[in-house]
Each structure stands twice: as C-alpha cells, then as structure tokens.
Image: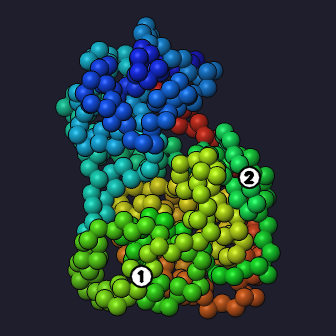
Amino acid sequence: MEKIVIKINEIDKILNIPTPNWLPKDWYKENENPFDWFDEIDRPFLENTTGMARYTLNFPSNLVKLETNPTSNYFYFIHKTPSDFFDNKIFNKYINDDVLSDIKNNKCKIVFYMDDDGGWGEKVPYFYNDDKLDILNQWVIKNNFTKEQVYFISHNCFLEPTDKKNKFTPISCSNLQYTSNISNHHQRKNSLYINYHHCGFIAEDSFTYDFNKIEKIFLSYNKNIGPHRFYFMYSLLKNNLINDFLYSFVENNTDAYCVDRINNYLIDKSKKILDVNIIEKTNNEVGKEILSDKIQVHEFNGEYYGQYLQIEDFEKTFMSVVTESNVGTNTIYFSEKTIRVLLTKHPFILISSQNSLKKLKEFGFKTFSKWWDESYDECEHFIDRIDKVTQVIKSIKKKTNKELIQIRQEMEEILLHNQRILLKKDSLGWLEQIQNIKF
C-alpha cells in the first residue's frame, strides 16, 4: 500500500524536534518559562531529540512519509495536546491557516490523536459531564468541515464512526491493541514492568497458579479514589466483605460533594442514603496499600503505577474485581487494569462503563456468565452496577475452597483464550484505517 503523507513543522529551535502541531511557532514567547506549556510527564519527551519518536507516533517508515511541505494530499496530526486544549479552545487559534484552507479544499485531513485515557465525552449523571467532544463538534460545524475531513483517534471504544451525533469520524485505538509491540521491559522477583502496556514478551500460557498459596478470594486495586471506588469500598464495608479482599485504597480524589451526590442519586431512586458510620469507616480505609503500591516506580524506569504488575498479588488471590478508570455513559475504556487480568489469566468482575463486558466480547474475549451473574454490565449508572456486583461477590464468597478451585479449573480454557487474544492484538490497527481513507 502507498505510504501516507503526514505534514510536520520545521525543527523547533528550543525543542530540537519539529514544533508540535498544536503549538504556535513563537510558543516560547507566551510564558515566562516556555515549558509551562507542557505538563511534567510530557516535558522529558519534548526537551530533547529523544522526543522525535514520540512526536511521530512511532510510525513505521514503510507506512508513513513525513514532510514539512507536502505537495500531495496529506494528514495533519494534532498529538499530545495540553490538558486544556479543548477547554480553552486554543486549537481555534493555533492550527495553521494554510492547513485549514487545505482541509476545506480536500488536500488535507486533520487527525486528533488522543492516545491517553478514554474519558472523552464521558457523562456521569450527578457527577460530571465531559464536553470536549461537544466543543470539537462545534469547531467542525463552525468551519463547515465534514466527517470525512476530521478524525478523532482515542481509547474511547464507545465512539462509533456511524454515530450521526458526532460531526467528526472517531477511530478507536484501544489499549487492548497495544500488546503485540513490546518496546522494553524489566523483570525482577515476582514483578513485571510493562512499558506503555506492551506485553508481547510474555509467553503464551504463562502464569500458572498453585491454589494452595491462595490467601484471599478477591484482588482489587484502587490507587486513585474516585466516586465509584469510594462507593465500592463503602459497599464492601457495609456487607462485611472487606476481609475477603487483597486491596488498595490509596489516594482520595473524591471532592467534598461526593457523598452528597451519591445520596442525591439514591434519594431520586427511592433508595436508602449512605450510613454515616460506614462513611467514616470508608474514609478510615484511605491509605491502605498492598505490596504493589509500596514498590518504588523508579525501579521500573516508568512514570505510571499501572505499567507494571506484581505477580505475587495474583498468586495470592482467586480472582480480581477491576475498578476501571471510567464508569460513565458515552465511553468504554480498557486501561492497564483490564490488561493485567487478561494477561495473567485471572478471572474478573469488571466495574466499568455500561456494556463494557459486551464490548470485550465484540473484541473476541470471553467472560464468566457461566459461573456468576454478569447482568451488572447492563446497568446504566455505576451505583446500580456496584450494587449488583456486590451481590455477585456475596454469592462467590459463599462457595467453599474446593468449589472455587473447581471453578478456576473449569475456566482454564477461557482464561488461556483471553490471554492468547490479548497477545495477538494488532497495535497498528488504527493506522490501517487511516491508510484506507480516501481523499
């Protein structure tokens, strides 16, 4: 297939890489400290020439041609923007006028490549409403662009190209596609570090378990405590389930109105509001760590907690309860949290957005409805989802150790199937979609 052409800017005299497409040429003049443009995580990738690979998205040279002044039809990638890119609508100001003209004349197609979390457009009633996609839609309408001229690549698997609500064309690059292209890893006793979720170095059918080593039934990581993790922990305490968990509950990011907003939802649904005594117990759990949380991340040469897994945690437990990053409507996002359980052949309950299990099945994975009720996946609001999950946990807890071991043995083929599917995912599937776009 013919290479696609991507327009890049001239080498920036401060960054020493092509000026990112979301920066004006004189970006360094707008702040006393030029690097205030970038958050701390992005700075190391932009302050020297090592940022080139990241800026160019690691495109294979046999598929992509980078040009500063393309003479043929080309793509213009907006990549790794500041967090307030859409909030402050700075893209209205900084996208090159020549590029905008080329888009209108069908010489260029613009691609917003947002390869971070999947909460783009997420809506959580009673809590928050992410309007970034609404702003992007308004921008497309204002410029009289068509869906065939503007593309939005993200980890939000809910967005569909056929959805008429959006004025742009979404393309999913799920984290689940990032597993076949390993870049580097470190290995130490009972630990694996997965750089940017790449885990292609792991052998198929790895992770075998000695059920005599099981200490707890459930494993659940909850480092950053949002409303859904707060309510999940509350439910475990309320139902005396906490002692069956190996769990973390580390950093409380819930705002002062979290409890009030949960109560407002419960009142509107004619349910009992939260018990103040259990709220106090929940707050007292903040700071709870397990071994994975205590390991210094710098030992693995990575910035993110989620980029490594602690094998020992999975060996000590029968199954996981995964509390994903996003639980609202208009989004489905699979982070490293879901990748871990698929990779390690750990059975799981998934507290995520509505129909997340359904989406996993569309990707070819199998789940566990043979052994427990998975109708929680159909609940629209995370509170109702967690209420159903709690009932599932209670039913599993009632089983004897012998019954649990038998269940795990019955699941082995499904668990191995999921691991195989994960390791065979194509990390450049979204690029093939770009290659097939016609001008």
Disc sitting over residue 187 in the figure = 2
Label for residue 407? none
Give the SS element for disc 2.
Answer: strand
Label 1: state its secondary structure.
helix
Residues packed near mark 2 inside 10 Å, few (<14), some (14 to 19) or many (20 plus)? few
Which residue is rendered at x = 68% and y = 49% of the image? 199
Q: Amino acid at mark 1?
A: Asn
Instruction: Confirm or deny contact between disc 2 and disc 1 (CB under 8 A).
Output: no
| Above/below status of 402 relative to 364 | below
Q: Does the rendering let one see residue 138?
A: yes
Note whether 75 is above or below 171 in the view shown.
Answer: above
The answer to which of 113 and 379 lies nearer the viewer is 113
Image location (x, y in percent) of residue 216: 65, 82
Residue for point 46% across, 87% down:
237
Rendering coords of residue 28 (x, y %): 31, 25
The residue beneath circle 1 is 284
Q: Residue 244 at x, y = what percent?
A: 59, 85
Count of numbered labels shown in the rendering: 2
Residue reaching furthest to the left? 142
Amino acid type shown at disc 2? Gln
Quarter of the picture holding the N terminus: top right
Residue located farthest toward the front when viewing the structure as drawn: 32
Categorize mark 1 by other alpha carbons within 10 Å: few (<14), some (14-19), many (20+). Answer: few
Is 98 placed left or right of 222 in the picture? left
Q: Nearer the viewer, residue 270 or 436?
A: 270
Q: CA distance from mark 2 to mark 1?
A: 34 Å
Please tell me in which quadrant of the rendered image residue 74 appears. Answer: top left
